[in-house]
Image (cartoon, rainbow, N blue to C red):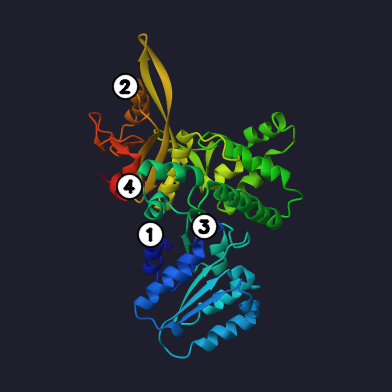
Amino acid sequence: MEIRRDFYLNKLIKHKKNGMVKVITGVRRCGKSYLLFKLFRNHLMESGVAPDHIITIAFDDFENKSLQSPDALYKYVKSKITDAKDYFILLDEIQLVSDFESVINGFLHIENADIYVTGSNSKFLSSDIITEFRGRGDEIKVYPLCFSEFYSVYGGEFDKALVMYFNYGGMPLCLSMETQEEKAKYLTNLFGATYLSDIINRNNLRGNAEINELTDILASSIGSLTNPLKLSNTFGSVKNVKLSVNTVINYLNYLEDAFLVEKAVRYDIKGKKYINTPAKYYFVDMGLRNARISFRQQEYTHIMENVIYNELRRLGYSVDVGVIESIGKENGESVRKKFEVDFVVNIGNRRYYIQSAYNISSEEKMKQEQASLLSINDAFRKIIIVNQPILSGYNEQGILMLSLQDFLTSPETALNF
């Protein structure tokens, strides 16, 4: 089974030979190695690059164990560069090389070498890894399969595929498993034995109970506003465990650094300023999130919101949670109201205001979904994404109504309808 990942492959192609080391980051098992060693290597050969000018090393292969020494690795790669033509150095699981930062910086001095690295342990999945390459690191962040990538392999009816994606997410290996029991077991083990184990080992945590509990709390409240104080209080009232606010902040940072969750902060649309707290936390993959709560609490309203968030982030948008204050009339008196906007989405000089609505079943529900968007007095596009078989287009209020199917199967086209 071959999964096309053209979005990321085209990024690698675009960044080819730009004088920087391409650092492919992302949560473990999301397909970074496959992207580099299979898809990108095939592209290079189809472009006329000779196989002996593509130096590939997987450091988790026992055959390459001797190359985990920085001196041995540097000498080996240098020995392979025998002429002035371009060489492409593809290094997988680079964190297994001691002092790998110095080795990579050494490779950057080879004029005809283009360097690509990926890694998958907690040290490499640090959010500040790019700084290790002294300003010459070019990060390409890889997410688990988006819906269109998933659907290109899964196929069938959209609604059935969507339910499967909502439940089990887009981890590539999970897609190849036949039964739902296999998928659930794989995701559960992956989260506990791999991700949380990495976090515990990297940060020298004395136990796993507290980080496990915090992860479960976040998984149970996707799409809900929270903050470290509220989470700390939850530990005290629900879990009967004392966990300081500073410890909660540290644990949240650990989960973000491992690319398991992302934080969306609040933005005051009218005041044009950020509000540091509360914020929302979204999981990078729905299957991983669901595995944390044993596939209970399948609230598709919140899951749909999380999936839309991930799709927007994959496309490179910055995504905030919007809030806008408006003054209206009730019983002849002025009333100050606050409205929430699910997503304030920015890239360059483009901005979109987006509401996620799983179902709009009545005129009253439509008014509720439109209220926040109609309170915004600027010319940026206002969008409601709804999981119903509608014909996408603008309504009488100038709001773009998008079906979830149109958005997930062709997001860029849909957003610029």
User: Where is mark 3, residue-wise?
Assistant: 173
- Residue 262 in sight here: no
- Alpha carbon separation for disc pair 3 and 4: 35 Å
Q: Position of residue 183 (x, y in %)?
A: 55, 50
Labels 3 & 2 near each other (Cβ < 8 A): no
CA separation in Å, label 4 and label 1: 20 Å
- Label located before the other in sequence (1 or 2): 1
Q: Nearer the viewer, residue 106 or 83?
A: 83
Q: Which mark is residue 350?
A: 4
Residue found at the far top of this picture: 331
Considering only order in the chain, which callout, 4 or 2, is on the residue closer to the N terminus? 4
Q: Which residue is mark 1?
A: 7
Which residue is drawn at the image coordinates 55% and 56% (left, top)? 27
Relative height, residue 240 to residue 69 (above, below): above
Q: Quadrant of the C terminus?
A: top left
The N terminus sits in image quarter: bottom left
Q: Position of residue 163 (x, y in %)?
A: 44, 41
Disc 3 on helix, strand or loop? helix
The nearer-to-camera label among 3 and 4 is: 3
User: Is residue 140 among the parts visible in the rendering?
Assistant: yes
Kindly report the distance in space between the C-alpha atoms of the residues bearing marks 1 and 2. Answer: 39 Å
Residue located 67% across and 35% down the image = 232
Q: Residues within 10 Å of mark 4 (few under 14, many from 20)?
A: few
Which numbered disc, 3 or 2, marks the residue that appears first in the sequence?
3
